[in-house]
Image (cartoon, rainbow, N blue to C red):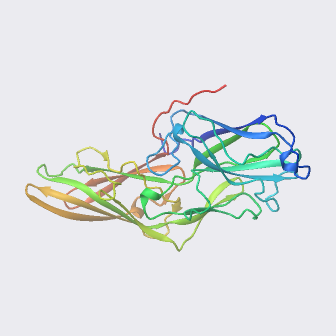
């Protein structure tokens, strides 16, 4: 897939099935006089060549999406971002037990008999006590803001999906269109063409320094965009010891050395030095020693874009390293999407 190929979206279609129920006995509560809202989710895509990871760890396929968070605002007329708040659902957890089961949540909500409801969603779900992903207050007017602080531990990072808002509904089917709002970085490595035949080498650690790690995902004009905190950055370590890198001897052809835990930084333009430090183990007969190489990502990249997968290819010789890279949309294998009536 070329860099200029159009962005494909993850479609997660959430259907609100309107099931008849008896009128509410509470005459003062006009929010529960309508019909019960039940979630039923099926997945569909413009192109079946896609992968939609939503949790930390392996990049998961569509049928492994088990939970999401939903926000909703009930307004008298059309949603007014200067006045209307998230008064109908606030980080409502919606789950299913497996890929074949129905989605459910509690307590149930009902379509109001008057006004309109606008919906917002993200995945994976995090509870309100989580400090890595937090939200704008329930009392704040406008669409929800998602505040994200990257964990320095790659294994604890999440793959953040956010849906396009679904606005001003009174009934019927609600279609959530999710897409990735982070970047994905993975590493491959190989021996240089003139690498000595009697030497073995494996990459033991990759350290990344200088990336900004905190920001707010805010709705501006027609979509969500990042507002980064320029004062927060940290170092990230991918290593054989922490299980992020594979312990493999390099070959003459590229091989992926990052395992199932992918590095998912916040999209950003590089305003300062972004440093790569690669530590490798060199073996020649009984001799074994460690070697270290340094590269600046600024030399070959100026930014990390939202929803893009970057593969950085390390080409190592005994005394030097070269870095090549490729950029693709963040989808990597075919999944058969079932059809539903």
Left or right of residue 215, residue 166 in this image: right
In the depicted structure, whether residue 131 falls above or below residue 179 = below
Residue ranking furthest to the left: 286
The quarter of the displayed image where residue 283 is located: bottom left
Q: Nearer the viewer, residue 119 or 207?
A: 119
- Residue 19 position within the rendered picture, expressed as x and y whole percent measured from the top left: 78, 34
Question: How many discs appear?
Answer: 0
Q: Name the residue at 51% across, 49% down.
A: 55
Q: Relative to 172, does residue 165 appear above or below in the rendering?
A: below
Question: Which x, y percent locates residue 32?
Answer: 83, 47
Q: Residue at x 53, y 74 (%)?
A: 231
Closer-to-camera residue (244/127): 127
Position of the C terminus, as image quadrant, is: top right
Which residue does the image show at 23% across and 51% down from the upper left? 192
Q: Is residue 20 left or right of residue 136?
A: right
Q: Is the residue 257 above or below the residue 226 in the image?
A: above
On the rendered structure, is 132 left or right of 202?
A: right
Quadrant of res 225 = bottom right
């Amino acid at each position: 897939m070329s860099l200029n190929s159009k962005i494909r979206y993850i479609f997660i279609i959430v259907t609100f099935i309107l099931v008849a129920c008896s009128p509410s006995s509470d005459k003062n509560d006009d929010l529960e006089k309508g019909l019960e809202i039940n979630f039923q989710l099926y997945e569909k895509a413009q192109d079946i060549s896609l992968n939609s990871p939503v949790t930390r760890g392996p990049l998961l396929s569509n049928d492994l999406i088990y939970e999401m968070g939903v926000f909703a605002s009930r307004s008298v007329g059309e949603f007014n971002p200067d006045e209307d708040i998230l008064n109908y659902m606030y980080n409502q957890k919606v789950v299913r037990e497996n890929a074949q089961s129905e989605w459910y949540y509690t307590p149930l909500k009902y379509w109001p008999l008057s006004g309109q409801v606008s919906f917002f969603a993200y995945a994976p779900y995090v509870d309100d006590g989580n400090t890595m992903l937090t939200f704008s207050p329930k009392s704040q007017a406008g669409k929800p803001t998602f505040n994200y602080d990257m964990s320095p531990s790659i294994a604890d990072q999440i793959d953040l999906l956010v849906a396009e808002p679904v606005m001003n509904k009174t009934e019927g089917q609600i279609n959530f269109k999710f897409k990735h709002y982070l970047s994905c970085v993975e590493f491959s490595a190989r021996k240089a063409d003139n690498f000595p035949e009697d030497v073995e080498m494996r990459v033991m650690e990759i350290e990344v320094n200088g990336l900004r790690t905190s920001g707010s995902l805010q709705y501006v004009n027609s979509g969500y965009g990042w507002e980064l905190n320029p004062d927060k950055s940290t170092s990230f370590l991918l290593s054989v010891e922490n299980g992020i890198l594979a312990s493999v001897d390099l070959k003459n052809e590229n091989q992926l050395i990052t395992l199932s835990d992918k590095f998912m930084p916040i999209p950003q333009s590089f305003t300062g030095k972004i440093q790569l430090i690669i530590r490798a183990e060199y073996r020649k007969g009984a001799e074994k020693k460690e070697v270290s190489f340094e590269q600046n990502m600024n030399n070959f990249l100026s930014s990390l874009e939202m929803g893009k997968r970057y593969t950085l290819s390390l080409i190592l010789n005994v005394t030097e390293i070269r870095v090549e890279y490729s950029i693709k949309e963040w989808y990597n294998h075919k999944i058969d999407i079932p059809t539903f009536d």
